[in-house]
Amino acid sequence: MTPAPVEVRATRYFEAAPERVFDAWLVPRTLGQWMFGPRVRQENVVRLDVDPRVGGSFSLKVERNGEIIDHVGQYLEIERPHRLVFTWAVKGESDDAPSQVRIDIAASSSGCVLTLVHTMEAKWAEYAQRTQAGWNTMLDPL
């Protein structure tokens, strides 16, 4: 029997329109302000390449502790401004078995609520807590 996948969840309320929050995931300049870089943690953005279409890919390279880390993935669903689904991996480490991230954004009376679900194979279970902490760190400045 195959072990059940591991899910990491994060939910945030934003006083911003769903379109604005959604677009923050697909514009390199904006990604570099909230997801990566010195405002988020001790790292420098090297290069952010985004091809925001279903089947398009991304490469988000940062330098952290003298090491280049390339977060890569492919867009599986793009339903602006409500849903974004993409694969997620670190090139050279987990790109042979990428995980999947689903972002759902629901309008509220004064902004929107974002729910992130990161699903990964059971073999990555030991990274669940670290993954949760990483998403929380990244979502706070968004």
Image (tube, rainbow, N blue to C red):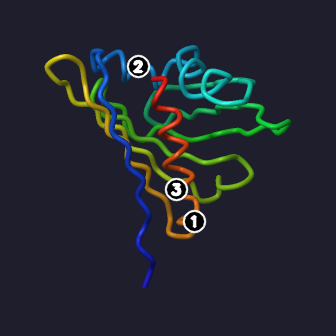
At 47% across and 37% down in the image, what residue appears? Answer: 75
- The quarter of the image holding the C terminus is top left
- 72 on left or right of 138: right
- 49 on left or right of 3: right
**Is mark 1 in CB contact (under 8 Å) with mark 2?**
no
| Secondary element at tag 1 | helix
Residue toward you, 68 or 34:
34
Front disc: 1 or 2: 1
Amino acid type for the residue under numbered disc 1: Glu
- Quarter of the image for residue 114 reads top left
* Mark found first going from the N terminus, 2 or 3: 2
Front disc: 2 or 3: 3
- 64 on left or right of 96: right
Tell me residue 70's x, y (percent): 70, 38
According to the image, label 3 marks what residue? 129
* Mark found first going from the N terminus, 1 or 2: 2
Tell me residue 47's x, y (percent): 71, 23
Amino acid type for the residue under numbered disc 2: Asp
| Secondary element at tag 2 | helix
According to the image, label 2 marks what residue? 23
Give the Cα separation between the discs numbered 1 and 2: 31 Å
Residue toward you, 136 or 83:
136
